[in-house]
Image (tube, helix red, strand yellow):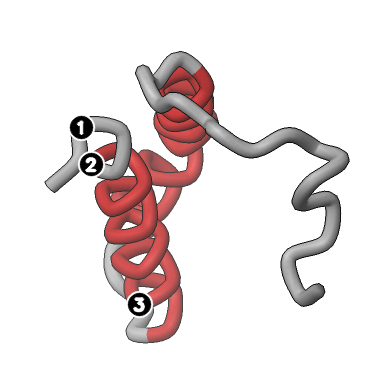
Amino acid sequence: MKNYLFPVYLVTAVLIVYVTAIQVNLATSLILFVFSFSPVLVLWMVYRVLTADVEVTSTFEEKWYEDQ
């Protein structure tokens, strides 16, 4: 697995657990903890994805719209 994809998968898994916890009425303290900790996870994910060492070979003018 690529190093920059791990945060995306982890934050998505936390989101699924959060939504499931709300739907099945789990402990309110767990729901509030995940809700309060989620901005930190999202910021970490954004930082890891934006600082990933990925080389883009195409320019904006070449592929400004992928369906062409």
Cα separation, mark 2 vs mark 1, equals: 6 Å
Give 7 or 60, whichever is nearer the viewer.
60
Residue at the image position 41 percent from the left and 59 percent from the top: 15
On residue 19, the disc is: none
Does dot 3 land on a helix, a strand or a loop? helix
Give 21 or 6, whichever is nearer the viewer.
6
Q: From what the image shows, is residue 31 above or below residue 3?
A: below
Residue, disc 3: 20
Earlier sequence position, callout 2 versus callout 3 = 2
User: Hey, what amino acid is under mark 3?
Assistant: Thr
Asked where in the image residue 52 lies, by quadrant, the reply is: top left
Residue at the image position 20 percent from the left and 40 percent from the top: 2
Give the residue furthest to the left.
1
Q: Position of residue 39 (x, y in %)?
A: 53, 31
User: Hey, what amino acid is under mark 2?
Assistant: Phe
Give 16 or 56, whichever is nearer the viewer.
56
Q: Nearer the viewer, mark 1 or mark 3?
A: 1
Does dot 2 land on a helix, a strand or a loop? helix
Q: Position of residue 7 (x, y in %)?
A: 30, 38
Q: Nearer the viewer, mark 2 or mark 3?
A: 2
Cα separation, mark 2 vs mark 3, equals: 21 Å
Q: Nearer the viewer, mark 2 or mark 1?
A: 1
Q: Position of residue 41 (x, y in %)?
A: 41, 31
Earlier sequence position, callout 1 versus callout 3 = 1
Q: Position of residue 9 (x, y in %)?
A: 28, 53
Residue, disc 1: 3
Residue, disc 2: 6
User: Hey, what amino acid is under mark 1?
Assistant: Asn
Quadrant of the drawing holding the C terminus: bottom right
Cα separation, mark 1 vs mark 3, equals: 27 Å
55 displayed left or right of 20: right
Q: Are marks 2 and 1 in contact (CB under 8 Å)?
A: yes
